[in-house]
Image (cartoon, helix red, strand yellow):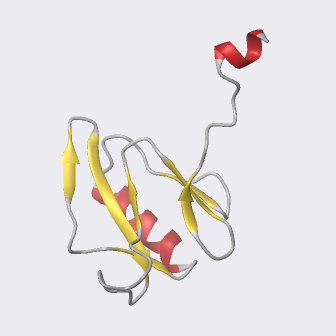
């Protein structure tokens, strides 16, 4: 966990990581969607949604892939953008 408003979902996440994510999400009014489960070579991906939201609600939630950082902006969740400049941008 980076700060109160970001959470780094690790590659090859464990059950302990999932429990930590669930506590962090609950503190912001969000939860892991139990109806979506995906796993890949780098670990599990999780679908998150507002607590109590259903799949037919207007806001579909957010799929968080292994190694991504989630950011809470005070009302919505989003995948945090990499703030480091790309090699091409740094060369300009």
Residue, x 58% and y 78% (percent of image)? 28
In this rendering, the count of numbered labels is 0
Quadrant for residue 47, please give it.
bottom left
Residue, x 20% and y 48% (percent of image)? 39
Residue, x 21% and y 35% (percent of image)? 41
Left or right, residue 8 beside residue 44: right
Q: Please determine whether, in this image, residue 54 is positioned above or below residue 79.
A: below
Please provide percent x and percent y for residue 90. Answer: 75, 15
Q: Please determine whether, in this image, residue 75 is positioned above or below residue 4.
A: below
Quadrant into which the C terminus falls: top right
Quadrant into which the N terminus falls: bottom right
Please provide percent x and percent y for residue 44. Answer: 26, 50
Please provide percent x and percent y for residue 65. Answer: 37, 48
Left or right, residue 91 beside residue 36: right
Left or right, residue 89 beside residue 61: right
Quadrant for residue 18, please give it.
bottom left
Front-most of residues 39 and 3: 39
Front-most of residues 74 and 25: 74
Front-most of residues 66 and 14: 66
* Residue lying furthest top: 91
Left or right, residue 32 beside residue 75: left
Please provide percent x and percent y for residue 74. Answer: 69, 74
Q: Please determine whether, in this image, residue 25 is positioned above or below residue 47.
A: below
Residue, x 44% and y 77% (percent of image)? 59
């Amino acid at each position: 966990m980076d700060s109160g408003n970001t959470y780094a979902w690790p590659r090859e996440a464990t059950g302990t990581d999932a429990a930590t994510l669930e506590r962090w999400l609950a503190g912001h009014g969000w939860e892991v969607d139990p109806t979506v489960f995906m796993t890949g070579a780098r670990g599990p991906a999780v679908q998150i949604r507002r607590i109590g939201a259903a799949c037919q609600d207007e806001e579909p939630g957010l799929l968080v892939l292994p190694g991504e950082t989630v950011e809470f902006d005070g009302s919505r969740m989003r995948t945090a953008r990499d703030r480091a400049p790309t090699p091409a941008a740094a060369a300009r």
